[in-house]
Every structure is written in structure tokens, then in C-alpha cells.
Image (cartoon, rainbow, N blue to C red):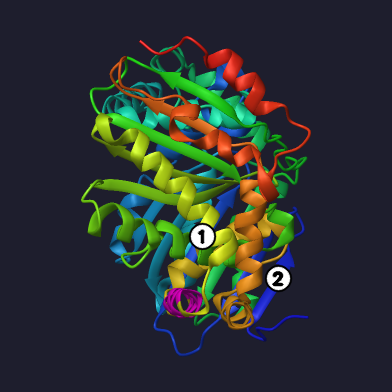
Amino acid sequence: MQIDPNLFYSKSSNGIRFATSVNNASQSVAISVGVMVGSGYEQEFEHGCAHLVEHLSFLGSLKNSDVSIAEKMSSLGGQINARTINNYIEFSCVVLQENAYEALGIMSNLLNLDGLESKAFENEKQVVLREMGCWGCWHEIQSLSLQAAFNDHPVTRSVIGTEDSIENMKMLTVQNFVKKHFVGSNVIISVVGNVELKLVSDVIDADFGYLLEGKGNELLKPVYSGGVRIDRGFCNTGHFYLGFLGPKVSEHKSLALNCLISIFGGTPNSRLMSEFREKRGLLYNWDVSWAEFGNETLVTIAFDIDVDDLKDAGKIVVEQLQSLATNMNEKEFGSHKRQLQLDEAVSHDNLLMQSESMINEIIDHNRPFTACERLVKVGNLEMEEVKSVAQNMLASVPTFVAMGPRSKVPTLRDLGLDELNSGSFEATGYGFFSDLRQRLSGTNG
């Protein structure tokens, strides 16, 4: 059943899927164009190609014109941006309602690199290399954690590539990558605001019609395994990363997961804020979040801290997650549920957030969901659903990554994480902890 009567979903003759959410009261329009190819679809020699293509797309010009895409969009007062993740590239913009159809047409040029010049290509490679140089320990930790979680599946590769892969990237490689993946069946468009359905459809047919339908990419299918990676000499500060398997994307439990994260550590009145900052004054930087990899969801707790506090902080994380799985109370659930309702209400009023969210929903569920629908679902959310998510996380094999001075980085046993393999949260069938103890024995030093 479609809850939002103003949401329309269709498909063009060349395979482009597009969703339109009509808001006649809005004076602006948000547009997102997604291409279902990210770092997870790259072959080894293409590592970093999707992200580089995202950069290069802005260097092109309008068809039959010397005016650049960025210049033309700026002339409309439009705000345009882009990002690349493991399963898609996304371009987004916001414009005044009167410029919506022209802006949508302009964005069609982002998917065509036919006029790319070799000098511009080489210059943009240098931009990416400089961007790479700004990444520090957290990027290294993220890479190690994904490799441990998904057993070195291509989805674990760094989106930006490596120095070697970018320096050795050929323009022909990029052009072939675009030719293979930038096809109608991989393109998804969402438009949110005061627009007419027929005009949106007409612009897509006219301006995106040059794309061949092609063969669409299948959803990435990494399999979560969990594991441990410990680096005892990389950073001078203690860095901690703990991951658990969350609800599968197909289970539609993201709202319950959002509520759990809010209670656990994602807000100023969360459990971790109280335990770490208010009671002990321990942490100055942490993050609790989740991300999708194919149909798998990885929930992560990451922080940097004085290395002498790593052990105590890790124990607090585990104790509080176990407590939420069994002793969550109605008061804290109700408070964070209302915060979640506010978040969805803000999203409902933010056209760009809506358009970007719909791209992700179409990729994951082959249909868009709007903030209107999500608000209804949040209202029906029960505390037992949130507790169930925590229980299932604790029953999964954890992913653990730690970095710091050689003599200070603890093992999982030091953190008390082997306690997860007992009681009602036993991870049966994995043999993980006994194997882990064997592999880590004698590694302190």
C-alpha cells in the first residue's frame, strides 16, 4: 500500500527508474541522479575509478556548448554536489522551482565524458591524490574494519583508491568504465518539489535518452564474516572500532536500528554520552552509525581515546549494548522515539534529503519511500523491535579493529568481548572466539 499519494514511480524507455514526489507548496526543487556503480563494482585495475569519474563529471560541458556544467548550474543559482560510496555514485542539486526542468536537463550531461581532455584528466588525478593525502588514521581503520567484516570482498576497498591505482589510471580505463556502467538500467533519478509529472518525464526522455539501456548491475552481495585486525604501531593515539551485523536491508528495520543507535550513542542524551563524558570524562571523539553493503548492514562503534583508557572504554561499550538488549526502559525509548520522529519530520521538510534518500531506497528495495511514509512507520515503532535488533547484533560475530602504540593496544579478551559468546547471546556455529584466542595468544608487546 502506498501511504504517500504524492509519490510517483516510473521507468523510461531506456530503463531509467525515476521517482517524483510532488510538493505544490514548495518554491524549490531537489534533484538527485544516481548511477548504480561504486567502488564495490570495480575490478582491481579500476580501483578508485568510480570516485575519479565523479570528479571528472563536473569538468564536462553542455551538449553543443562551451559552457561548463558547473558554470551553467551556478547561473541558475543552483547548488550541486556529488558523492561516491560502495554501491553508487550520486549527483544532487537544489534549484528554484522555475529552473527545475532546465536543471534536470543540465544534470544529464554529468553522465557523458565523451569530451574529456587528457590534460583535464591528468589534473584531476592530482586533485584526488591530494585529497588522499588528507586522510589519516580513521580512513585506515575503516579499511581494516571492512576487510575484517567482509573477508576482503571488493566492497571493502577504499572508495578513493590508492596512490598506485590513481597514478597508473589510464583515461581509456575510465572511458571504458563509463561506457560499461553508465547505462539507463543503472540510472536512478528522484525529483522532489513543485513539479509536473509529465514535464519531468519529458525531460528525462529527451535529455537522458542518449543513454543505452544496457545491462544493469546486480546488487552487491558481500557476506558478513566478522573478524579481527590489530595494528600495534600505526597511530600515536588509541583508536577503537567495533562492528556487529545489523538487520538485513530487506528486513526493513532501519528505523528500529536508528532508534537503538540514538539511545546507545548517537545523541547528546545517549547511554555512551552519559557513561563516557558525564560520569568519567573519557572520550572526546566517537561515532555510532550503520552502513549498508548489499543486503548486509554493518553497525559500528568507533572512537579515539587515550590508550590507557582503551580497555575500560571497550568494556563500557559492551556492557551498555548488553543492557539495552535486556533492560531498555520505556522512558528512554519514548524520548528517543520522539527524537526520531523529529528527524523524519525535518527530512520531510528538506527536499534534498528526500531526493537523496529515495535514490538509496530504490537501489535497496526497488521502490522509493518518502519521509511521509517513514513518519507513519516511526509512530508504530515498538520498544521490543528495538531490543530485538540489539539482541541479534550481540548474537553475531563481532568485527574488531584497534590501533595504537605497540605496548598499549588490548586484545578482545582484554576488553571482555569474549563474554559475548555466553548466555542468551551465544554466537553458535562460528567457533570465532576460540579461534581468535589462539590467533591472538602471545601478541601483546
169 w.r.t. 80: above or below: above
Instruction: Label 2: state its secondary structure.
Output: strand
Name the residue nearer the viewer: 419 or 161: 419
Residue at x-position 38% and y-position 53%:
81
Residue at x-position 28% and y-position 22%:
235
In reply to whether residue 51 is colored magenta, the answer given is no
Residue at x-position 67% and y-position 59%:
362
- Magenta stretch secondary structure, dominant: helix
Hey, which quadrant is residue 25 in on the image? bottom left
346 w.r.t. 210: above or below: below
Hey, which quadrant is residue 219 in on the image? top right
Residue at x-position 25% and y-position 57%:
279
- Residue 29 rendering spot, x and y as whole percentages: 45, 74
What amino acid type is highlighted by mark number 2? Tyr
Q: Which mark is residue 9?
A: 2
What amino acid type is highlighted by mark number 1? Ser
Quadrant position of the C terminus in the picture: top left
- Residue 245 rendering spot, x and y as whole percentages: 63, 44
The residue wearing badge 1 is: 32
Image check: 78 left or right of 1?
Answer: left
Is the residue under label 1 in contact with that under label 2 (CB below 8 Å)?
no
